[in-house]
Amino acid sequence: MKITIDSKSGFCAGVTSAIHGAEEELKVNQKLYCLGDLVHNSAEMERLKKLGLEVITYDQFKLLKNERVLIRAHGEPPSTYEIAAQNNLTLLDYSCPVVLKLQKRIKDGFDKSQKQNGQIVIYGKPGHAEVIGLNGQIDDQAIIISSPENLEGINFSKPVVLFSQTTKDETGFYQTAENIRAGMISAGQNPDNNLIINNTICRLVSKRVPQLRKFAAEHDIILFVSGIKSSNGQFLFSICLEVNKRCHLVPDVSYLQKEWFKQNDSVGVCGATSTPMWLMEEVAEAVKKISLKK
């Protein structure tokens, strides 16, 4: 049995930077607060918690005084920084530069659209940390669209400025844009003049789609290592499954089943932008032990 780990899988630069920052801080201080899960991977979060990272909710954050709090790569709304200033909190801000740029674009787009009585629409997952931060830039006045089919809340008779959460899929984004365009035409609006489409999906995320398609096609069986809560993981897993039906979502080694494997299988191990390389290596090592028993 041949086992290969996809070298292009694993943490994106924003997540890598945030985790490194947490590790360095915890070498100096025994405790560090983090506003929400630093990464959507339970195995990695358990590792960081053992080092002293303590995850807190927004309600807990509001009650903290004179502490150090890490801001994860997803970014935060302005209200988070206002609370930190009021409570004398030191923020270790690891917001992803790509997300910060998008936050500014949404704020600028909103200011311009207000002059035309327009609407800001974000293709994203409602309640996702990044989406909360994006919407917070404009006092939560954006319309959040989770799928191309659900366009509830959009007034097609008014101008629309469309953005995307950085980790969403391009296919769904462009289908959303087309459906909005069709809705505007039905409402008597000219979308060429009244619809602005901003593809703000992270280039690293979008590039992983063709890379994973190729990787999934090169192996008999694919083990996609990802946390259950990772929206990026769910999407990229679906891409692998389209190409290779012998594809399994594996949060950790406990999910492996020896019945999945055949003696001469070529096994590909890959993962989401929230998947640590050490976890993919652990899965590959466990598969190797299974192969030795066959």
Image (cartoon, helix red, strand yellow):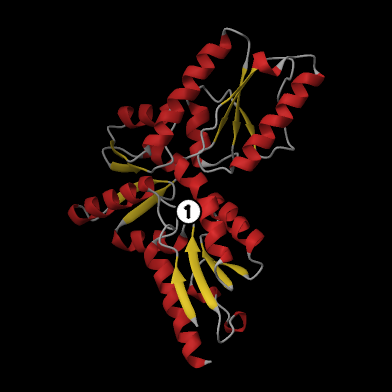
The residue drawn where x is 72% and y is 25% is: 181
Amino acid at pointer 1: His
Q: Where is residue 238 in the image (x, y as percent from the top left)?
A: 62, 56
Observer-nearest of 95 and 8: 8
**In the figure, 262 relative to 46: above or below?**
below
What is the crowding at mark 1: few (fewer than 14 residues within 10 Å), some, or many (at least 20)? many
Q: Can you tell which quarter of the image residue 91 is in?
A: top left
Q: Can residue 100 be seen at all in this image of the molecule?
A: yes
Q: Can residue 230 be seen at all in this image of the molecule?
A: no
The residue positioned farthest toward the left in the image shown? 28
Locate residue 278 relative to residue 258 in the image: left or right.
left
Q: Where is residue 163 in the image (x, y as percent from the top left)?
A: 56, 29
Under tag 1, what secondary structure? loop
**In the figure, 187 relative to 46: above or below?**
above
**In the figure, 93 relative to 160: above or below?**
below
The residue drawn where x is 29% and y is 35% is: 89
Locate residue 69 relative to residue 267 in the image: left or right.
left
**In the figure, 40 relative to 139: above or below?**
below
Q: Position of residue 247 (x, y in %)?
A: 61, 68
Judging by the rendered image, the residue that carries numbered circle 1 is 40
The residue drawn where x is 18% and y is 53% is: 28
Observer-nearest of 235 and 219: 219
